[in-house]
Image (cartoon, grey):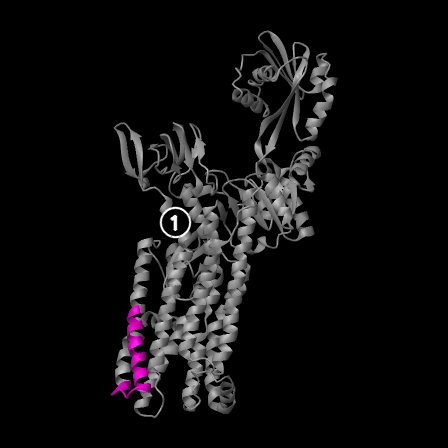
Amino acid sequence: MEQINIHISGMHCASCAGNIEKALQRQEGIASASVNFAAAQAFIEYDSSQIDMEQIRQAVQQAGYDIAEEKPDADSETKELKRAARKMWFSAVLAGVIMVLMMVDMFIATVPYYFAITAVLAFPVIFIAGWDTHKGTLKSVKNLQPNMDTLVTLGSLIPYLLSFLSVWFPITTFVEMAASILTLHLVGRFLEAKAKGRASQAIKKLLELGAKNARILDDGGETEIPVEQLKIDDIMLVKPGEKIPADGVVVEGSSSVDESMATGESLPVAKKAGDEVIGSAINKQGFLKVRVTKIGKDSFLAQVIKLVEQCQGSKVPIQEFADKVTGFFVPVVIFVAIAAFVSWMLFPGFHSSIAAWFNFPWINLDAPKVTLAILATTAVLVISCPCALGLATPTALMVGSGMGAQRGILIRKGQAIQTMKEVRIVIFDKTGTITKGRPDVTDIVTFNEFSDDDVLRYAAAVENVSEHPLATAIVEKAKAEKITIEDVDNFEAISGKGIRGKVNGKTVLVGTAALMEDNGIDSKSASQQQAQLEDQAKTAMLTAVDGRLAGIIAVADTLKENSARGIKEIEDSGVKTAIITGDNERTAAAIAKMTGIDYVISNVLPEGKVEQVRKLQQQYAKVAMVGDGINDAAALKQADVGIALGTGTDIAIEAGDITLVRGDLAGVISAIKLSNRTFEKIRQNYFWAWFYNAVAIPAAFFGLLHPIIGAAAMAASSLNVVLNSLRLKKADIEPDSG
């Protein structure tokens, strides 16, 4: 199954997005299609053996829309916004002149040929500035799928044409109203487009992060080329202050690198030969030579953009219900508008009594019955706003996912936004998630006048040739303490007990108490300290030199700096936490005690983690799983929300719904906060959209709202939803300090 993001042109409202989704989902070979009206894009999963890109394009075109040949860039979006502004101002000037003439005619003096002049002035507003709207209506009628354009056309074009009946019959003209409605519609479109542009800035900013050129080393010296021409294994020269052009590995030099664009971490990270660097990060100090390892769609930045777009194109469960309602919204509104006309014509007294009770300044009950009926009908059409419903989720997702990307929190599935707030327990994998995933020397205890350096020097010498995973920790500790690692002779590994070797002619043993006992060494004096260290989830290894006990070296997979703080904040929020590990119960319990976790699941093989997640789902309903995204992939998939910890450039983790680039648990609480804040905005948006329509449509039906006020309110409702989503940027999602 393949996945693609395509950019759609010609969408004017949420109904358009629903129409495209239906058209795509009817095609054989398309597993799912989700259209984001706010971002003007569709996310499609399809079987390339059954349907190809050309057939997808044809399905979109048959629905009345088109696929943009290229992804819209900043220039094309600016041009589109300027075009919308020109149409708005062109229409506003002409409509303004019409309104001035109306005021003069009503309150100062009769304007000769008033109707003819206003009809001529309104013509370019209705048929030129409003042509795209009417064209959208024609497409929707052709496909029997009415949308927002249909309502605006019915609310402006029909009243304009009806006004010409005044030539033969003594009826009120609606030219002023028609021009004002369409002008306000265009004003709303412009403001909405501008606000949506601000909501979608995340992708634009990510695209702008990339370096434009790269300086590579070749036989001829330095050559500057566009980044698009970089190849794997090219050697790039990066000077201080420059962006690193592509993902790679440092082969020469050392520096500090600002990776805040990827991780949200403000402090620069030290880099030396052998370290990975991220394309678009900024080299702060020294010169670096970097070998290119990833380019194009495999690069870190490309993966981030893909994940953000994927989130923006996905659906939140609450949106599915709203989309179903939106699909019926326009036909229902048209039916209500017709019902309003019929009701006003049949029961004018009933409606007039209600309007008279409210007695708003714009209500003129002296107008002919047919005029009042047309005003009510038009008001229903133009005040109804499915756009606000359609924008409620996408705009909040666009802002939320953008905020996350800037802080190293990549939301892959929008569904996680809604599910996260329902999670009652978070399960943490131990190794690499709560802990650093690598052993470190934590304690050195000495005996018989041996010093710390003595114990470390002898142990490191024999461990330097050992293949045991804990040996590296001891050797690295010795190097860090600048202790010379000497040669070893007669090295021997004793299965299950430890190792033996000769260092400077002295016999050195490192291992268990059983190894000491086998070699006649009394280690009883160390038993108490050894037990205490093991109770702290540390592996305690005894060291002996020439038959004498020298000391204990304790090695442990230590906690990440933010683990305890992050888990405490999760617990404080009312969400339970659990640890799941393949380690023994004593080690798991020690880690749980240090971090404040009270639910311990130990001795679990990787394949058994899925079953443990299922058990907790039965008990707590909604479960989140946090893991490293590799050996925990199945458990992450099983969990209601999978949170994968990525590090550096390794973010291509398909198992998780959310990926944390920084790789520590401080990011988990930030992800939870971001999810909660984003869904809170989605709920607010839906409330105001529903509230607006629930109040406005009945008010228009009973003649309490003038169509011009309705058109302004319609534009304001959509704008309010977008601006409310933008307020999400002010939300605090950082972990509590200390």
Question: Total of numbered circles in the picture?
Answer: 1
Predominant secondary structure, magenta span: helix
Task: Report whether 116 appears left or right of 583.
Answer: left
Which residue is depicted at the point 28% across and 88% down?
Answer: 109
Task: Specify whether residue 33 is in view.
Answer: no
Q: Is residue 542 magenta?
A: no
Give the percent coordinates (x, y) of residue 614.
Answer: 66, 48
Q: Is residue 440 above or below residue 732?
A: above
Q: Is residue 432 above or below residue 383?
A: above
Q: Is residue 444 above or below residue 390?
A: above
Of 224 and 17, which appears nearest the observer?
A: 224
Which residue is the extreme one toward the front? 108
Of 559 and 327, which appears nearest the observer?
A: 559
Residue that label 1 marks: 205
State which region is magenta: 89-114
Q: Is residue 569 above or below residue 241?
A: below
Q: Is residue 104 magenta?
A: yes
Give the percent coordinates (x, y) of residue 118.
Answer: 28, 82
Give the percent coordinates (x, y) of residue 313.
Answer: 46, 56
Give the percent coordinates (x, y) of residue 75.
Answer: 30, 54
Task: Report whether 186 appears left or right of 551.
Answer: left
- Label 1 sits on what residue type? Lys
Of 125 and 353, which appears nearest the observer?
A: 353
Which residue is depicted at the point 57% across and 36% down?
Answer: 561
Q: Quadrant of residue 463?
A: top right
Task: Specify whether residue 659 is in view.
Answer: yes
Where's the C terminus, which quadrant?
top right
Task: Report whether 528 appears left or right of 677.
Answer: right
